[in-house]
Amino acid sequence: MPADRHFSPAIRGLLTIRPAPLRWPFAAAVAACTAALVATGWAAGDIGAGLIATLGVFTADYGSRRPYVNRAFHLAVIAVALAAAVTIGVWSAQSGWLAVTSVSAVAVGAVWLCSGLAVGPPGAFIFALACAAGVGVSASHRPAWHRIATFQRGAGRVIGTLAGLCLAALILGAGPTGLWLALVLASLQFAIKMSNVRNYALATVFTTATGLTIASAAHRVDVGRAFSSTAHWIP
């Protein structure tokens, strides 16, 4: 069937691990930064602040193929935009409808920004995730999982998100705290940096798990209920 021939390359693309330059030194540096931020927040008695700070690490995912000077300006814009997204999420956590509206607005604005700057993967998704994580850390009584999954599109993202939900459920079910939480998030960031140029669906698994862990690890979560709520919102 002709349709089958069209679908086969797409399916193979989801399963293909592409070759990439040496990545582990960069991935290890990002993982160390992540662990240091979480550990600092834990030591200061404010693990939520440490978790929020780790969202800035996602800046390293952008503009890797740009010239140094160009990338410096590019990352400056990305960093400011990420900080704004988190700030909006924290501010909007006071109300459920306000949080949903704010995350939606950030997602739309991120698409416009990424299109205007010709930003490659992970694109607008990280900004929506950062905003939703800001909501989740601030609103400890209200899981923010479903707001992240609303912005998943495409087969790779949907599959990666579902797998990421399962991974996040395992992590949150284990309930890591303190330095163990720092190690878990460092490991997730290492996995993201090792996979994001090789297989986007695989990178989405770790990105989703990271966002949900950041959003929910600062407080106790009903994992089963949160998983069901998020899965319902995946298109």
Image (cartoon, rainbow, N blue to C red):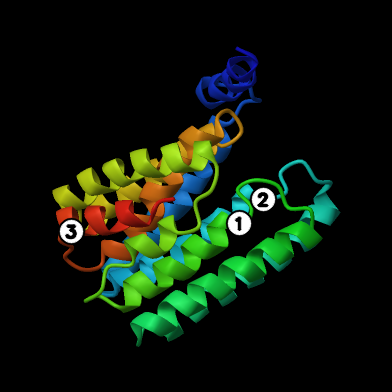
Q: Are marks 2 and 1 in contact (CB under 8 Å)?
A: yes
Say if residue 216 shows up in the picture: yes
User: Going by the image, does 54 lie left or right of 139?
Assistant: right
Point out the tag, 3 or 1, that comes first from the N-terminus.
Answer: 1
Which label belongs to residue 62? Answer: 2
User: Going by the image, does 53 lie left or right of 1?
Assistant: left
Point out the tag, 3 or 2, that comes first from the N-terminus.
Answer: 2
* Alpha carbon separation for disc pair 3 and 1: 31 Å
Q: Are marks 3 and 1 in contact (CB under 8 Å)?
A: no
* Alpha carbon separation for disc pair 2 and 1: 6 Å
Where in the figure is residue 79, as x and y percent of width and height?
Answer: 64, 66
Q: In which quarter of the image is residue 229?
A: bottom left
User: Going by the image, does 7 lie left or right of 32?
Assistant: right
Q: Mark 1 points at which residue?
A: 59
Residue type marked 2 = Tyr
Where in the figure is residue 181, as x and y percent of width and height?
Answer: 27, 53
